[in-house]
Image (cartoon, helix red, strand yellow):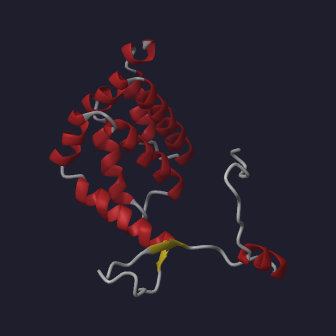
Amino acid sequence: ALFLRKHGVSVLRECALDYNADIQVRALQLLCMLAHAHPACRHELRDVGALKAVLKTLQSFPAEMPLRVLDPTLDLICHAVTATPRNQAYVREIGALPALVDLLVYLAEACCVPRARAAAEPNGQIVLEPRRPPPICTQLAEASAQQVNLAAGEGADA
């Protein structure tokens, strides 16, 4: 709370816009933690212009924004709008939704491959599956091809 009273969000906003990607990542991570832990911080993100600034930086991806900066940027946007209708409306008002949708489509296309359309999908929808890197060796390929059948209560979480 003291951090918020001392205008810490404004300082972190400037760090989140720094030219150094390491500084950007750390500042964005700190803002995420604050927005998660303090709902008042979510409003301050909007009021000091941090939300608008990070939404604007998304336009520079992938040309000027490294992927490692994109992850905490999207995390911050998620935390800023969670359970905060005023911030959700703000994102719509400044016209950031199309850019977010374009970005998510870009990421889906870059990280997933379309699965062949099956007869079970008569609506014509394309289902995306995550891309998996090729196995390193034959033994790993055989191991990855085996199905794991666990009975209830036998998994790692049990």
Q: Quadrant of the N terminus?
A: top left
Extreme residue toward the left, this view:
93
Relative to residue 41, is residue 106 depicted above or below? below
Can you tell which quarter of the image residue 101 is in? Answer: bottom left
Side (left or right) of 126 relative to 112: left
Relative to residue 35, is residue 128 depicted above or below? below
* Residue 118 coordinates in the image, percent (x, y): 43, 86
Side (left or right) of 38 relative to 136: left
Q: How many marks?
A: 0
Q: Nearer the viewer, residue 61 or 80?
A: 80
* Residue 19 coordinates in the image, percent (x, y): 47, 47
Q: Nearer the viewer, residue 157 or 129?
A: 157
* Residue 93 coordinates in the image, percent (x, y): 15, 45
Side (left or right) of 144 relative to 43: right
Relative to residue 79, is residue 99 depicted above or below? below
* Residue 48 coordinates in the image, percent (x, y): 28, 29
Q: Nearer the viewer, residue 17 or 47?
A: 47
